[in-house]
Image: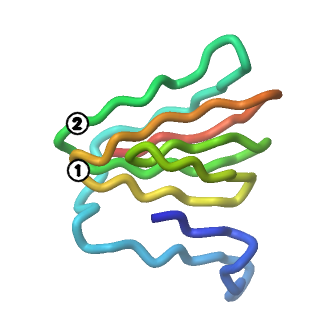
Amino acid sequence: MILRGRDLPEENRRKPYPLPKECGVLQHFVQRVTLPDNPFEPHRHEGAELWYIQDGEAILTLDGDEHRVESGDLIVLLPNVEHGLRTDSRVTWICMA
C-alpha cells in the first residue's frame, strides 16, 4: 500500500494519512538516506513498518513489483511483505515500526 502525499487533502495545515489498524503502536523510528551505492535491499520480517519519503525519489520493491515513490509518500508495509528501496540519486526517508 502506498499513500501518496500529493493525493491527500490538507486539513488545518495538516495532511492526515489514513492507516490500516494492522499498523498498531510504533516502536521504531529512524531517518535514513539511500544513495545509488547503498540500496536498502529487499527483505521481509514479521512486523509492520511505515516508511515516509521526506525528500527525493526512489524505486520501491513490494513483493517483486516496482513502484516509483517521491517526497510526501507514506508506504505501509504489512507483515511478511518483501520490501526494498533504491534510487538513482538521493532519497531521505523515515522508517517507523
Instruction: Give the residue at x 65% y 41%.
Output: 59
Discs 1, 2 touching: Cβ within 8 Å: yes
Quadrant of the drawing holding the C terminus:
top left
Q: In this view, does 76 lie to the left or right of 28?
A: right
**Mark 1 Cα-neighbour bin, 10 Å: few <14, some 14–19, many ≥20:** some
Instruction: Give the residue at x 70% y 47%.
Output: 54
C-alpha span from label 1 to label 2: 6 Å
Residue 42 in percent (x, y) is at 42, 30
Instruction: Give the residue at x 64% y 76%.
Output: 15
Q: In this view, does 51 lie to the left or right of 27?
A: right
Instruction: Give the residue at x 72% y 21%.
Output: 35
Examine the image and state in which quarter residue 36 appears: top right
Which sits in the foreground, 11 or 74?
A: 74
**Mark 2 Cα-neighbour bin, 10 Å: few <14, some 14–19, many ≥20:** few
Residue 30 in percent (x, y) is at 48, 33
Residue ID for mark 1: 79
What kind of residue is marked 2? His
Residue ID for mark 2: 45
> Element at badge 2?
loop
Q: Which of marks 1 and 2 is nearer the N terminus?
A: 2
Determine whether 18 is above or below 84 in the image. Answer: below
Q: Is residue 33 left or right of residue 83?
A: right
Determine whether 73 is above or below 94 in the image. Answer: below
Q: In this view, does 68 lie to the left or right of 95?
A: right
What kind of residue is marked 1? Pro
Examine the image and state in which quarter residue 9 appears: bottom right
Farthest residue, direction top:
37
> Element at badge 1?
loop
